[in-house]
Image (cartoon, grey):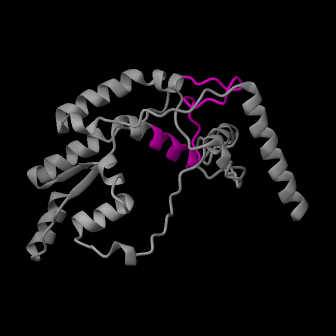
């Protein structure tokens, strides 16, 4: 990276590095969803009494500390760091924050935003995780699995996905270590996270989601 920076600066360009930093807690919620959307199965994410959450043996939730340390080693005091939650409070969201604060764009009302990475609902993430358990996106040889599929229904009424309190307790030590290291690296203002969690799922709720999935699938089969 340093060689690339030297080449850029040798051509009279100025680099202004900026990083939006999620707290370890917020990052855990986000990265769990992203990994599941990507076709991985996480033992940490339960499905009520049908699949209890378990500590992950093969996959750990990354916290971004290594990447931040590398960026600081390269850019040092040049690197501007902003808590992601602060950027989210901008009236136009984190994208608007970057355009406003970093790029100097003030006419944000004239910009049409296209959201390409919409958050998935609680039911979608948990159902998809069970699909990934049976048919992961890639097999053990890292070959694309032709049987893998993604849910079409969004199950929006189930609310946004968050880890449950019990699921968080299974990674409590990791979160505590990450919070401590991040606070030492950047300061305590970077470890504040959203305390909202998903409610524990009971058998009735799990069955309702499964039957809703069956209904939506039957409609699609009938239409075809």
Is 97 placed above or below 47 here?
below
Q: Quadrant of residue 5?
A: bottom left
- Relative horizontal placement of residue 31, taking residue 152 as reference (left or right): left
Residue closer to the observer: 136 or 42: 42
Q: What residue do we see at 14% from left, 70% from top?
A: 7
Magenta-highlighted residues: 29-55
Q: Is residue 50 magenta?
A: yes
Q: Position of residue 36 (x, y in %)?
A: 56, 44
> On screen, 89 above or below 125?
below
Q: Is residue 141 left or right of residue 187?
A: right
Q: Quadrant of the N terminus?
A: bottom left
> Residue 83: x and y, percent?
27, 46
Camera-nearest residue between 221 and 102: 102
Give the residue displayed 17% in from the left and 54% down from the top: 80
- Left or right of 110 on screen, residue 4: left
Residue shown at 45%/70% (left/top)? Answer: 113
Vertical side of 6 occupied by 26: above or below: above
Residue 169 position in % (x across, y down) = 47, 21
Residue 37 visible (yes or no): yes
Q: Quadrant of the C terminus?
A: bottom right
Q: Which residue lies most toward the right here?
A: 222
Is 213 positioned to the left or the right of 120 in the image? right
Q: Main secondary structure of the magenta part?
A: loop
Give me the residue at 11% from left, 70% from top.
9
């Amino acid at each position: 990276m340093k060689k690339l920076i030297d080449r850029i600066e040798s051509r009279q360009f100025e680099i202004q590095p900026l990083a939006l930093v999620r707290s370890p807690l917020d990052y855990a919620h986000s990265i769990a969803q992203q990994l599941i959307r990507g076709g991985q199965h996480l033992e940490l994410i339960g499905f009520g009494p049908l699949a209890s959450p378990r500590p992950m043996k093969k996959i750990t939730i990354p916290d971004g500390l290594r990447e931040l340390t590398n960026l600081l080693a390269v850019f040092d005091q040049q690197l501007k760091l902003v808590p992601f939650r602060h950027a989210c409070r901008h009236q136009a969201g984190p994208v608007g924050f970057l355009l406003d604060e970093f790029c100097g764009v003030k006419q944000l009302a004239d910009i049409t935003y296209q959201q390409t990475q919409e958050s998935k609902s609680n039911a979608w993430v948990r159902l998809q995780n069970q699909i990934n358990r049976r048919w992961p996106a890639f097999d053990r040889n890292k070959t694309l699995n032709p049987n893998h599929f993604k849910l079409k229904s969004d199950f929006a009424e189930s609310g946004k996905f968050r880890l449950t309190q019990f699921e968080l307790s299974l990674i409590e030590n990791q979160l505590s270590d990450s919070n401590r290291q991040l606070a030492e690296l950047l300061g305590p203002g970077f470890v504040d996270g959203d305390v909202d969690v998903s409610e524990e799922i009971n058998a009735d709720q799990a069955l309702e989601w499964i039957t809703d999935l069956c209904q939506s699938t039957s409609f699609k089969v009938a239409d075809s």
